[in-house]
Amino acid sequence: MDRNSFWSIASKRIPAGLGIIVLIFALSGCGGSSQNSAEAVKPADAVKMEGEEIFYDDGLPESQHSPWTNATGGQLAAVFTPTFYPAVLAKVRFLLGINGIPTTEFRVRVFGATVSNGPDESQDLLASEVTASALFGNKWVEVDLSDQNIIITSGDFCVAMEWLTPPGDHGENAQFIGVDHSNPDGRSWWKTDSRSQWERIEEVANIGDRDVMIRATIIKK
């Protein structure tokens, strides 16, 4: 199979929408660049109560990706570095694309990780299995993880989207996730199925780096 079939969706811009799980949430930080922006820093009290969203995309996906495989267990992930410790992971968001079947259920994964080496699946940080789905495509899907008691005391962590339905050769049988090509941060990782190894996303078919559109909100403990 040609590995370029992984990147089967032509580049285009998709309007950022609203997040959907049970309620509809407003899209925030759509025009931002990353957690390092001075404008993104909140007063300490606000961070403790409302949380701080870490993100590396600019809110405008240039394309959508899905693992090119007829097996389950493929994942796309982003590695996050908190701006403070200890940090409680309160919620995560995924930008689901419009192509394929966006309403397909997927599994949320949270692992230990490093920016240099990627996800470490031996460090599963979720206390129980979490799944989610969208009602529509082109929407942020928000997942509340406040009951999982995930506390990051140092270093990095990663959030991944796992395909529970085989995507098919071109992803048409399941959902897609948005990716941002502009000013990538080298934090996005990919694996074809449950048995494959993690790879940096720019190493897949040598197509160049990009940011998988996953975001994480942390709260001061």
Image: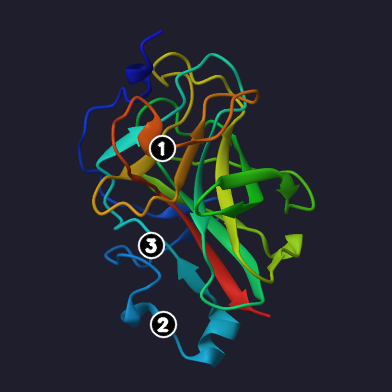
- Please rate how many residues cluster around mark 3, counting C-alpha atoms within 10 Å: few if below 14, some from 14 to 19, many from 20: some
- In 3D space, how far apart are the residues under numbered discs 3 and 2 (Cα atoms)? 18 Å
Mark 3 and mark 2 in contact? Answer it, CB < 8 Å. no
Q: Which one is closest to the eye, mark 3 or mark 1? A: 1
Q: Residue at x 37, y 78 (%)?
A: 40
Pointer 1: what residue?
201
Q: Residue at x 36, y 54 (%)?
A: 185
Amino acid at pointer 2: Val
Pointer 2: what residue?
41
Q: Is residue 62 above or below residue 184?
A: above
| Residue 179, x across and y down, in percent | 34, 43
Lower sequence index among marks 3 and 2: 3
| Residue 14, x across and y down, in percent | 25, 44
Lower sequence index among marks 3 and 1: 3
| Residue 180, x across and y down, in percent | 30, 47
Q: Which numbered tag is attached to residue 27?
A: 3
When asked about the image quadrant of residue 183, the answer is bottom left
Mark 3 and mark 1 in contact? Answer it, CB < 8 Å. no
Amino acid at pointer 3: Leu
Q: Residue at x 31, y 56 (%)?
A: 59
The residue sitting at the top extreme is 1
Q: Residue at x 34, y 52 (%)?
A: 17
